[in-house]
Amino acid sequence: MTHGDSGKRWLRYGCFGCLGVIGIIILFIAVLVGIALVKVESEQVEDRAITPTLPSVEPAPAPTPPGTAETVPTALTAGTVILDLRDGGFSIEPAPRGEALRIEAKYDRDSYELREVVETDEQGRWTYRVSFQRTASLWITSLKELFGGTSPVVQVLLPRDIPLELDLDVNAAGGEVELGGLWLKSFDLAIDKGGLALEISEPLEAPMERMTVHAQMAGGAVRSIGNASPRTLEIDCRMGGLAIDLRGRWQQDSDISISTAMAGTEVRLPRNVLIEGIPTDRVSFQRELEVRPPTLRFSVTSERGEIEFID
């Protein structure tokens, strides 16, 4: 047998091997599609509306005129809301004024799981934890939703008249958040492999003490942070991109830390404040002000990234 015949034989075997691999891949995909189609037909769609029972306190009653019935109003204590949202779409917004904290969700319970619990410590302070995540195969779930299955949606409605600490953890998910008009003492946001559009369209009930934004392999926009007026603001972006809008009605000084690593961050500066820590062309204007506005003090670090300030 010549070397030419041997080479042709191995080439023929190699082609057969490649065709075999391709056939296996096609068969695998066909099986996944078949399973996904069956899952679409057998969906167990859960449509839930949850209003958790939160601890309340009874303040001392005010003096009432003789002969009138005495009523003692109840009020909810300050608390913490912790949201761990994964693998789906979501929205967070203020509830209509006077309405309670509420969760509304629609999802296939064979593919996703929603958990919620209220915890209370010895001082009567409450914590409400909500977690939502996928429990089935990513491949099958994605194909099922592609072929007409139910895409999961979680909506969180936050009360306006209760002081809250809000902790939002987003992982492989995307959504929209509106915090304007709420009474937030602090807000901690972490995004990992997801996307988020957040806006604070009107001032909060009171200036916020702390706000942190940590994004990793993620992208998003945070608009009108000035309406939250946080005393401290920490922004950390790694391997992603963020658009940060600091405009709004600042009511107090703020210490702002911005750091990036292999990421791009755009920061839009407000006009109604003093700026320290970064170059600005407003020095002469600032000296002419009769009433001293809030001061934003910046600390900026960047490691193989870019931070662009827009004045």
Image (cartoon, rainbow, N blue to C red):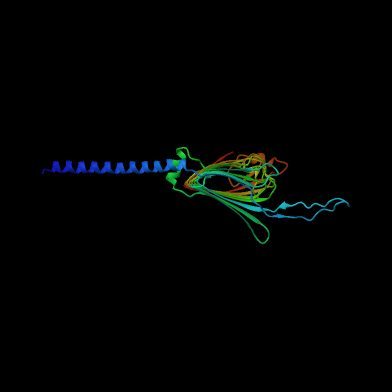
Q: Is residue 8 visible?
A: yes
Going by the image, does 309 lie left or right of 32? Answer: right
Quarter where residue 141 is shown: top left
The answer to whether residue 209 is seen in the rendering is no
60 in relation to 20, above or below? below
Q: Nearer the viewer, residue 197 or 277?
A: 197
Instruction: Where is residue 100? Give x, y as percent.
Output: 67, 47
Quadrant position of the C terminus in the picture: top right
The N terminus: image quadrant: top left
Q: x and y percent of residue 227 in the render?
A: 65, 42
Question: Image point 20% across, 41% down: which residue?
Answer: 12
Task: Please state the horizontal and vertical placement of residue 110, each as a whole percent of the image.
Answer: 49, 47
Direction left: furthest residue: 1
117 over 270 or under it: above or below:
below
Return the residue nearer the eye: 141 or 44.
44
Percent x, y of residue 244: 57, 42
At horizontal 27% and vertical 43% (from top left) the residue drawn is 20
Residue placed farthest to the front in the image? 42
Q: Nearer the viewer, residue 309 or 157?
A: 157
